[in-house]
Amino acid sequence: MKKLVLGILALFLMVNLAQAKMVEKPDLNFAIDYKKLAEGEIHYAFSLMGAQDLPNDIAGIDTMGILNIPSSRILYNKIAYIIKKPVQNFNYQHVTNAVEVQRLMPHAKVKKVTERSFSIKTKGLFGYSYKMDMEYDSEIVSTANDAAVIESIDRARRLDGTLGQPDSTIFRHIYDFSKYSNAGVSLTRHYDLDGEATLVVTTNISSVKAMFAIESIIRPSFTKETETLVELTRK
């Protein structure tokens, strides 16, 4: 395993990440392909479905009742990529800093409400607003005190299977949307790659109002926002 990681890192250093590309995977909970991710690829799974169609192991990370919201469709996606930053970069102070949250969301105006709660308003004619609560979990610092949040974090780790224990996890609950969506949960796990790089894995489950659940509109928006997010995270 040590040699594998070192080989991945060596490959990673030779890659021009400006040429990174999005690659869709057919499996909703796809396995991690370290070699391709080290080449700069961004792997993702995407699906817009009824709540009853989401596999039980994935549905288990929803401990906030997202899947029970009526008159809606479920937007699911999983994203994986590698960045050339040590995992310690994703510490509690960094990821909950309002300046950093704003930097990663250039399309929106972010206002910090409490230490880990934010009010977000997207820009443009079709903009919308929502609220986001964050929790952070690692061996050093954990703000996850709510039983539902702890259970969601644990189930997300189980989804990752052989990846082992993540060095840190960010739990996000998004809710109180002004339009288009109802609510959602997002869990991002960070895995150390020999102290020089980090594997990032995110799973998102959102409830979209049925009349706005149009894949031809949502899919290109998702891919564009994901590419932007990864590019900014890598900077």
Image (cartoon, helix red, strand yellow):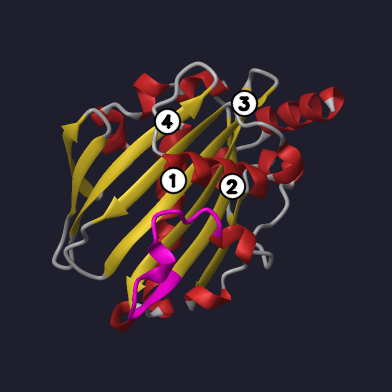
Q: Nearer the viewer, mark 1 or mark 2?
A: 1
Location of mark 2 (residue): 155
Location of mark 1 (residue): 148
Task: Tell me: residue 58, above or below residue 107.
Answer: below
Q: Nearer the viewer, mark 1 or mark 4?
A: 1
Residue that appears at 44% across and 24% down: 142
Location of mark 4 (residue): 136
Q: Report the front residue among 157 and 99.
A: 157
Quick one: label 1 or label 2, which is nearer the N terminus?
1
Could you tell whether 226 is left or right of 2 in the image?
left
| Rendered image: mark on residue 197 | 3
Q: Quadrant of the C terminus?
A: top left
Between the residue at mark 3 and the residue at mark 2, the CA separation in whole angstroms equals 24 Å
Q: Nearer the viewer, mark 3 or mark 4?
A: 4
Could you tell whether 66 is left or right of 190 in the image?
left
Between the residue at mark 3 and the residue at mark 1, the CA separation in whole angstroms equals 31 Å
The amino acid beneath tag 3 is Ala
Between the residue at mark 1 and the residue at mark 2, the CA separation in whole angstroms equals 11 Å
Q: Secondary structure at mark 2?
A: helix
Q: Report the front residue among 226 and 150.
A: 150
- Magenta segment boundaries in residue numbering: 60-74
Quick one: label 3 or label 4, which is nearer the N terminus?
4
Residue that appears at 83% across and 23% down: 2
Query: For the residue carrying disc 2, how many other residues have a C-alpha within 10 Å: few (<14), some (14-19), or many (20+)?
Result: some
Query: For the residue carrying disc 1, how many other residues have a C-alpha within 10 Å: few (<14), some (14-19), or many (20+)?
Result: some
Between the residue at mark 1 and the residue at mark 4, the CA separation in whole angstroms equals 14 Å
